Image (cartoon, rainbow, N blue to C red):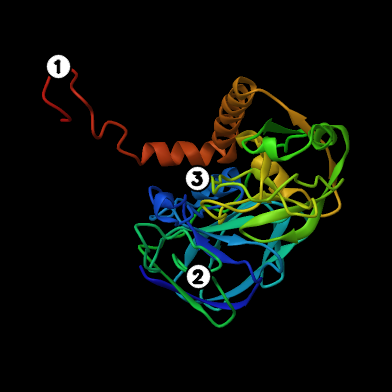
Amino acid sequence: MTVRLRIDAAGPLTSVQDAGRRGAMRFGVPRSGPIDRFAFTAALAAAEPGDGTALELSLGGLTLTGLEGEIGFALCGAAFTAEIDGRLLGSWCRANLSPGQRLRVRQSGGNRAYLAFSGSTTAPPWLGSRATHALSGLGGGMVRAGDGLEFEAARPASPAALSAPVSGSGPIGIVIGPQERYFAAEALDRLCAEPFIASATFDRMGRALDGPPLVPLRLDMPSEPALPGCLQLTGDGRMTMLLADHQTTGGYPKIARVISADIDRLAQLEAGTAFRFEAVSVEEALRRRRALATAQAEALRRLIPSDDLAARLLGSNLVGGVVDALGAGPD
């Protein structure tokens, strides 16, 4: 079934995203993809879109109207709440939208949420991915008022309240480097000794962090690769954490990198929230990432109500693609 929706209002950072564009950074193309990777994955698990895409919502939320066909959807992420024709569904939910109904998603806290639909978007891929690079608009595309969305192979979903995971707490872990040589020892000491504040200034390229100025000793460094989570400092010592649409090389000197386990958490901190950095070893960063992956896998198992999961299993081909270890391949 084909479903058509109309965008009535959308925040300026609303975009189509998939898991990200792989293999193109060497050509200067950012990976893009979701800022909050777990919330994105949770929305996909709940809605089961056919193409692995979702709308990333940010400032201003989203309002859309069903034009043709019924479709299921799931909302996961920060404190964004959904309502249909004034009927409150809450946050972390799954429901259906029918023709003539209006879905409104409002932001009440945090910075990003993900709205996944039970169907396959007709938005064309770019370089093999629908992940949208916001500055250029390439990929699945930015979503604006007046746009239409179309989904193929759409289907309804079982309405449910989803189990939101408990967010982490404590200092934000960082690994010092790779360009710490461009900072005085005093700046390195202040990085973990003094608090910082999550700024309200952010986009898909990065998030500004207010705190003590950590002024680089020089700016004439050779161009080096950049990665999500890198903490780069401008000439006057203002810090920015790079996010999904970051430049692939160059930029200002990078004093440290936020560990993978804490990037999403720092990106979602509400503006004005104070936090501290904690320097850890590479080995500790890996240990925390593995521990988080285990916790998130368990959270995904709890996400779907057990009766709904059982129904899905009963209707699934659980033995398809069996591999014969003694034979030539899959049977």
Pointer 1 local density, CA inside 10 Å: few below 14, some 14–19, many at least 20: few
Q: How far, Cα to Cα, is label 1 from label 2?
A: 49 Å
The x and y percentages for residue 109 are 78, 55
93 or 45: nearer the viewer? 45
- The answer to which of 216 and 261 lies nearer the viewer is 216
For label 3, the residue is 45
How packed is label 3: few (under 14 Cα within 10 Å), some, or many (20 or more)? Answer: some
Q: What residue sits right under mark 1 in the picture?
A: 326
Q: Give the class, few, some or many, for how many residues have Cα within 10 Å of label 2's Cα (few <14, many ≥20).
A: some
> Could you give the CA–CA distance between mark 3 and mark 2, rounded to whole angstroms?
26 Å
- Residue drawn 58% across and 39% down? 303
Circle nearer the viewer, 3 or 2: 2
Q: In the figure, 62 relative to 80: above or below?
A: below
User: Horizontal placement of 231 versus 160: left or right?
Assistant: right
Q: In the rendered image, which residue does mark 2 sit on? A: 137
Kind of residue at badge 2: Gly
Circle nearer the N terminus (3, 2): 3
Secondary structure under tag 2 reads loop
Amino acid marked by disc 3: Ala
Q: Quadrant of residue 65?
A: bottom right
